């Protein structure tokens, strides 16, 4: 799920930033908020704890905020929370259901930028055993162009 969410983040940020760049020459800070309620989606994904491929169906609410200053500096953040059902392709694997939260934030000025993504899953398999997954990914680019990245994920 993390890789899919990261891809969604890149697409969402690209769309928001194109609008922000178009408004960068405007006077005071420009702020935009996008709210999504009761959205659904189904997509192929891997169980983050077992690696089993399958289909995930999600129902979620989300909020995205972007603030852009005339000099091109911006801050963007978004949160998505909802329920999921993971149906593995292999009938010998268990279905999992539960809740998830996805958050991202990015800041950029004329010299540097950084972005962070967090993802949390809590739920249970068909036999009642728990599924818990947490992950965080981060990237920062300094004024000199030095880039630092990391991604951690943990099932417990």
Image (spheres, helix red, strand yellow):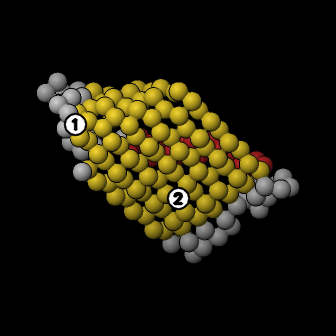
In the picture of the structure, the residue carrying the numbered disc 2 is 115
Point out residue 94 in the picture as x, y percentages from the top left corner.
19, 30
Marks 1 and 2 close (CB-CB < 8 Å): no
Give SS at disc 1.
loop
Give the residue drawn at x 30%, y 38%: 123
Q: Nearer the viewer, residue 122 or 77?
A: 122
Point out residue 101 in the picture as x, y percentages from the top left corner.
44, 43
Point out residue 22 in the picture as x, y percentages from the top left corner.
76, 47
Mark 1 surroundings: few (<14), some (14-19) or many (≥20) residues within 10 A: some
Q: Quadrant of the N terminus?
A: top left
Give the residue drawn at x 50%, y 40%: 80
Q: Nearer the viewer, residue 98 or 36?
A: 98
Q: Is residue 75 visible?
A: yes
Q: Is residue 120 left or right of residue 131?
A: right
**Residue located farthest toward the bottom when viewing the structure as drawn:** 144
Q: Is residue 43 visible?
A: no
Residue 51: image quadrant is top left
In the figure, 109 relative to 137: above or below? below
Disc on res. 52:
1
Give the residue drawn at x 59%, y 51%: 77
Point out residue 114 in the picture as x, y percentages from the top left corner.
55, 63
Q: Is residue 140 left or right of residue 119?
A: right
């Amino acid at each position: 799920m993390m890789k899919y969410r990261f891809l969604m983040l890149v697409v969402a940020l690209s769309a928001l930033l194109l609008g922000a760049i178009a408004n960068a020459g405007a006077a005071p800070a420009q702020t935009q908020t996008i709210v999504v309620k009761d959205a659904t989606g189904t997509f192929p994904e891997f169980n983050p704890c077992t690696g089993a491929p399958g289909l995930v169906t999600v129902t979620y609410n989300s909020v995205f905020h972007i603030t852009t200053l005339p000099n091109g500096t911006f801050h963007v953040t978004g949160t998505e929370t909802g329920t999921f059902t993971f149906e593995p392709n292999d009938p010998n694997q268990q279905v999992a259901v539960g809740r998830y939260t996805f958050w991202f934030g990015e800041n950029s000025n004329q010299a540097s930028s950084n972005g962070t993504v967090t993802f949390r899953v809590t739920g249970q398999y068909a036999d009642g055993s728990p599924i818990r997954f947490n992950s965080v990914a981060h990237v920062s680019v300094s004024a000199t162009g030095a880039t630092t990245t990391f991604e951690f994920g943990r099932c417990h």
